[in-house]
Structures are given as C-alpha cells and as structure tokens.
Image: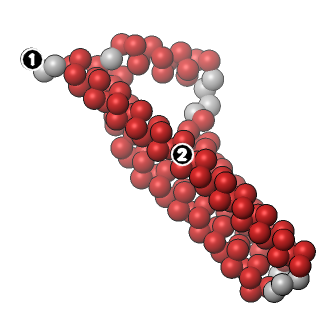
Amino acid sequence: MPDHTNEAEQIWTWLFHEDTLFANRGSLMLVAQSMLFAAYATVFASHYGQWFLDLIVFLGALLAIIWLCLSLVQRRTYDPLQQRLKSTDKLYREITEHRKRSFPLKLDLLVGYGIPILIVSVWVLVLLINH
C-alpha cells in the first residue's frame, strides 16, 4: 500500500515552491514593468528619440509576454499537482473548496494571465498613440 502521507507532504512542499516562484516572478515583473513605464515617461518628456521610446515599448511588451509564457508553463506542473493533492489530502481539499465558495475568482489566473495581457495591451496602445 502506498504511503499517501509522505506523498501528500511532498506535494505540499512542491506546491509551496511553485507558489513562491509564482509570487516572486509576479513581484519582479511588476517592478520591472514599473521601471520601464517610468523610463518611457522620462524619455518621452526629454524628447530623446523615438527609437529609444520604441525600444522601451518593445522590452516592456516582450517582458510581459515572457511572464505570460512562464505562467502557462508553470500551470502545466501546478494543476496536476493540485489535483493529486486534493485526491490524497482532506485538509487541502477542504481549504481549496472553502476558497472557491468564498471567492470564486482564481487570483493566480488574474495575476499570471490577466495582468501580463493587460500590460502588453497598454504597451501596444502606447506605441499606436505615439506613432
């Protein structure tokens, strides 16, 4: 008979690691995007050059697309682990069900997909307005 307690502990640890990666990546990306928006505003105000503004827009959009792709890749690991833990750990199943009833919107999807898509859209809009 398999040792589900040990398996549940391992999956809890792995999911914690995945959550930490997700949170740290989101924080890092938001700081980077903020710096790029500030750089864009500074360069725009100084009339330094259109090529430099375009470069900042390109970097901002590229960074947001990378963020989105990394979130998609991470979901491929996270979702099966989460399902497996739900099937073996009663406490985890109760916590996730309570969260779903309390707040049906999945915040990790908003942060991992919604915000990067919004940021790319803003960069594209900035590029279109400025040309």
The three-letter code of the residue at mark 1 reads Met
Percent position of residue 98, x then y? 53, 15
Q: How is the image coloured?
A: secondary structure
At x 58%, y 17%, the residue is 101
At x 65%, y 59%, the residue is 32
Question: In the depicted view, which residue is nearer to us: 51 or 126?
Answer: 51
The image shows residue 51, relative to residue 127, as above or below, that is below
The image shows residue 58, relative to residue 29, as above or below, that is below
The three-letter code of the residue at mark 2 reads Asn
Percent position of residue 123, x then y? 73, 67
Which residue lies under the disc numbered 2?
24
Tag of residue 23:
none
Q: Quadrant of residue 127?
A: bottom right
Decide if residue 90 is on the left or right side of residue 111. left
Q: How many numbered badges does the structure rendering display?
A: 2
The image shows residue 120, relative to residue 103, as above or below, that is below
Which residue lies under the disc numbered 1?
1
